[in-house]
Structures are given as C-alpha cells and as structure tokens.
Image (spheres, rainbow, N blue to C red):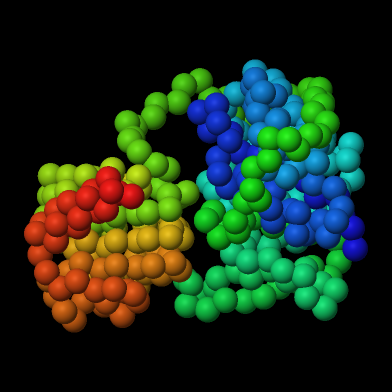
Amino acid sequence: MARKIIVLGEVRDGSLRNVSFEAVAAAKIASEGGEVVGVLIGDSVSALSGELIHYGADRVITVEDEKLKQYTPDGYSQALMAIVDAESPEGLVFGHTSLGKDLAPKVAAKLNSGLISDVTGLEVAGGNLVFTRPIYSGKAFEKKIVTDGLVFATIRPNNISPLEKDESRTGEASSLSVDIKDLRTVIKEVVRKASEGVDLSEAKVIIAGGRGVKSEEGFEPLKELAKVLNGAVGASRGACDADYCDYSLQIGQTGKVVTPDLYIACGISGAIQHLAGMSNSKVIVAINKDPEANIFKVADYGIVGDLFEVVPMLTEEFRKILVNA
C-alpha cells in the first residue's frame, strides 16, 4: 500500500542532525513506494532542503518564521499541523530526540492518532508494517503494527541506516506561509554549556566513565580516547552525582539512551539503570578492576584492570592503528 509519509528534518546549529536522514530511510520503508515529504521548520532553513532530497526525500516543504528560530512545542506544532492539513499524509516520522519526544505526542493528540515511539526496527511482513521497539528498559522487545489511522512513529538514533547520499537526486523544494500566533512560550535567549566533539545521542563511538574515574580530572584519559576515535564522552549517573561531570553526559534510564557501534565503559559497575541506556550498543567493552562487576554480564569484551592504565594503552594502540590505516 503506497503511502505519503511526512518526515520532520531536525536542525541544530544550522545543520541537519543525522537522525533526520535515518527518519527518511524509515519513511521510505513505511511509504511502500509512495511519496516521502521532508519538512523543515525554523528560521532560514530552506538552504538545507537539497540535503534531505539527496538522502531520499522526494520533495521538501519549509516553514520559515523568526518565531520558529528556537524550538517551542506551540510554534512547531502550528507549522506542522498546517503542513498536515495541506498534504493529508498517511503517516509521519520523527527522530526520537528531545525535540521529537516532546513534539510527537502533542501532534499525535491533535490528530487523534496513535504513536509508536522509540522505534529501533521497521519491516514489511504479511502486508503490514511491523515496528520493533524496546520495552522494560531494554530487557525485551515488542513488535507493533498499525491497524487503523496514521502511521506515526519516532525513530531511535543509530538504529536504522540512512540511505546512501546521492547528490544527483532531485526533488521539488517549496515553502508554506503559516501565521504563527498565540505562543505561550517565547525564548529570549539560549545559554549553551560548552561542549566538544560528537553529539552523544548520535555518536558511533562512546567512551563512558563511572565512579571509577574518581574525579573530574579522571575523565581526561577518556576524552583523549574519544578524540582519537572521533567519539563522544558519556557518564553514569554515579559520576554525575559525584560532580565529576555535567548531567548532560548522563546515560541511563533517567539520562540519554544510546546505541553506538562501540561503547567502552570505564569504571562503571553496571547498575540496571545504566544498562537501560546502553545495553543495545552493538559492541560493548567493559574496563573495571572488579571481575564481578555487573557490567561484564552485558559486555562483549571485558578487561579486568585499572582504567588509568588500560585507557592510555588503548588510546596509544588505536592511535597507531589509525595512523597506519
């Protein structure tokens, strides 16, 4: 059954987040040969239309307004609902990001639609679209189908591979004028904490530290390894609670849920709350002095040793391998 699917492209700091391209790939599956319409909302975002098309969108619609420069659920939902009214799609796909998790339920409620959130897999089977999502903090997975109404889903980053970028792919780019009004929230200023390197939620490699790093300075070897591997640094709640790092780095049930290709856990015991945020990583390496640490139960590879000795050795070896590659 061919469907028209709308995909929300998420813009951060003037660039499209990688999960936007993953959402386009998911929409391609969901459309079953129908049309994938990319949507860009913001201020001066039309220049990014071509990139969405290169990654598989058939055409792109932009809504630009100075009131949309910063995300607010009221502003974005007004813009998106105007597009839905104009296009009458059979489905919508968002990234399962902070923005997507906030906006998708609001739009679903307005459309009187169900929502399948945190999707990690999508396939067509028996004439149905089958969505896979984790439940019970990642201990199990469930499969869901949509029997009636819109196909509406949010896609967890790093789980559905984007289509290969093709700069020869062409498509129509248009704009829609929407009167954004009655905003209950107006953002006057955004104060960002200084951050370096790769976005944690989309990183392919994550080096995470726990209480075993012992101090803020203890994260320095982890940052060096992350730099060599072009990865991101994360942390357990224990490390955040101990003021070794900012809570923005927290991975776990009450932090970020990540699924990188490689997750290196340094000095992390493996509390169930932390495992809920990273246990679906493709390859897990655990470094801990305690051979009985729970983290080893989910690790693909385990190193029993002092992280302050092991991590610098790994950094040096990776550096040698990458230089000679």
In the figure, 276 relative to 208: above or below? below
Q: Quadrant of residue 252 in the image?
A: bottom left
Q: Is residue 14 left or right of residue 24?
A: left
Q: Quadrant of residue 153?
A: bottom right
Please tell me which residue is depicted at 68% across the width and 66% down the height of the picture: 122
Q: Quadrant of residue 81?
A: top right
Query: Can residue 143 be seen from the camera position used here?
Result: yes
Residue 123 is situated, as x and y percent measured from the top left of the image, at: 72, 69
Q: Residue at x 43, y 49 (%)?
A: 203
Across and down, in percent, residue 271 comes to 29, 71
Give the number of marks: 0
Name the spot of residue 137 as percent of width and height, x first: 47, 71
Residues 45 and 81: in front is 45
Left or right: where does residue 220 sit relative to residue 175? left
Which quadrant of the figure contains the N terminus?
A: bottom right
Please name whichever residue, 35 or 180, is drawn nearer the observer in this view of the structure.
35
